[in-house]
């Protein structure tokens, strides 16, 4: 099929219209080229569906932001992001229990203990300046009685606000394994070997594994040719990196700011506040 036939089949299968800009984005991601080489329609369709969902969500959020429907909580240089102490969407039973526990603490302390959050979190940047992939790290502290689904809900809300694509990619594990293998070889040799050399090394390891494996261990799959090995690497390479709304440069700049301020100031301050009602001088 030519590109226009592929586009028409996708639109029919996904029950949607793909704009020229969206099609150009899919081509830039290499999805069309991969499909033309592999002919794997289910994987191709899934990748297109995931990417269309991500860019359409971003476009809608951008429209809402421009219309003033999304207002970000002001914070100094993005470093001291603190979500609400108690998420507003706790289910009724959890919120009622939290309120009752707060009243009990007030009674037991004679009103002297300040209210404290049952669950709170802080956002930190890392990587970038040392050459590693820049990342956001979200640290959550929750009292152990909190339902796990409430903690997960708070984590997912932060993911949705900071990531373009939250769902795990549909890329098969083998593609990630090939990407890891290639990067490990490149680190060991200080250069990237030819694809045929690396494919041969992969197949040799597969043979050794299959010869040595126990009866219940899975078989390692070699590649018939280096081109299939290369295509798996490209799929794994694209899917490995998380997709944040902030650019690598923006997250790296936050790491530099944190370093100039003496390290993890936001985290240290958050921990100090968290422990203030737990560890008291002279407490027994």
Image: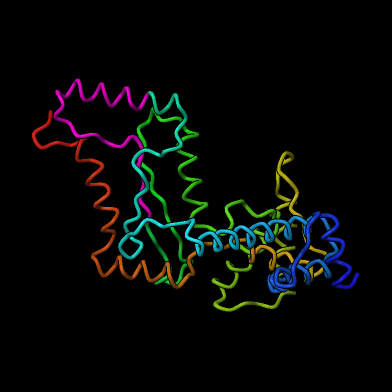
Residue at (22% x, 47% y) in the render: 272
Q: Estimate the x, y position of residue 213 in percent, counting from the top left.
A: 70, 46
Q: Is 151 on the left or on the right of 195, as rendered?
A: left
Q: Position of residue 243 (x, y in %)?
A: 56, 62
Residue located at (43% from left, 57% from top): 71
Tell me, what colour scheme is on the image?
rainbow
Q: Does 43 appear above or below 87?
A: below
Magenta segment boundaries in residue numbering:
97-123
Name the one closer to the observer, 158 or 44. 158
Q: In this view, does 47 lie above or below 273?
A: below
Q: Is residue 261 left or right of residue 167?
A: left
Camera-nearest residue between 213 and 195: 195
Q: Is residue 116 magenta?
A: yes
Q: Position of residue 225 (x, y in %)?
A: 81, 69
Q: In this orientation, does residue 230 appear?
A: no
Name the spot of residue 187 as percent of width and height, x first: 54, 71
Is any atom of residue 190 visible in this view?
yes
**Would you place residue 135 above or below residue 194 in this image?**
above
Quarter occupied by residue 51? bottom right
Q: In this view, does 281 lie to the left or right of 175?
A: left
Residue 36 is left or right of residue 66, and the answer is right
**Residue at screen point 49% across, 56% down:** 69
Where 93 falls versus 139 (above or below)?
above
């Amino acid at each position: 099929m030519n590109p226009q036939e592929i586009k028409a089949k996708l639109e029919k299968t996904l029950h949607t219209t793909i704009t020229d800009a969206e099609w150009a984005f899919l081509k830039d991601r290499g999805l069309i080229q991969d499909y033309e080489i592999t002919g794997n329609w289910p994987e191709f369709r899934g990748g297109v569906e995931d990417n269309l969902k991500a860019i359409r969500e971003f476009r809608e959020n951008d429209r809402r932001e421009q219309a003033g429907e999304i207002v970000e909580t002001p914070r100094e240089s993005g470093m001291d992001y603190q979500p609400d102490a108690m998420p507003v969407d706790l289910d009724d039973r959890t919120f009622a229990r939290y309120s009752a526990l707060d009243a009990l603490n007030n009674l037991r302390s004679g009103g002297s203990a300040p209210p404290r959050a049952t669950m709170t979190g802080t956002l930190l940047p890392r990587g970038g300046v040392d050459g590693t992939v820049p990342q956001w790290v979200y640290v959550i502290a929750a009292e152990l009685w909190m339902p796990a689904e409430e903690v997960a809900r708070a984590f997912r809300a932060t993911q949705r606000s900071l990531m373009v694509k939250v769902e795990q990619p549909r890329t098969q594990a083998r593609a990630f394994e090939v990407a890891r293998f290639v990067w490990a070889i490149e680190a060991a040799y200080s250069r990237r070997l030819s694809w045929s050399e690396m494919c041969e090394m992969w197949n040799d390891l597969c043979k050794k594994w299959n010869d040595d494996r126990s009866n219940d261990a899975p078989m390692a799959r070699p590649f018939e040719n280096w081109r299939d090995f290369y295509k798996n690497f490209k799929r794994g390479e694209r899917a490995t990196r998380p997709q944040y709304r902030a650019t690598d440069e923006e997250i790296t700049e936050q790491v530099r700011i944190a370093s100039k301020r003496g390290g993890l100031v936001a985290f240290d301050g958050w921990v100090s506040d968290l422990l203030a009602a737990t560890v008291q001088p002279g407490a027994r």
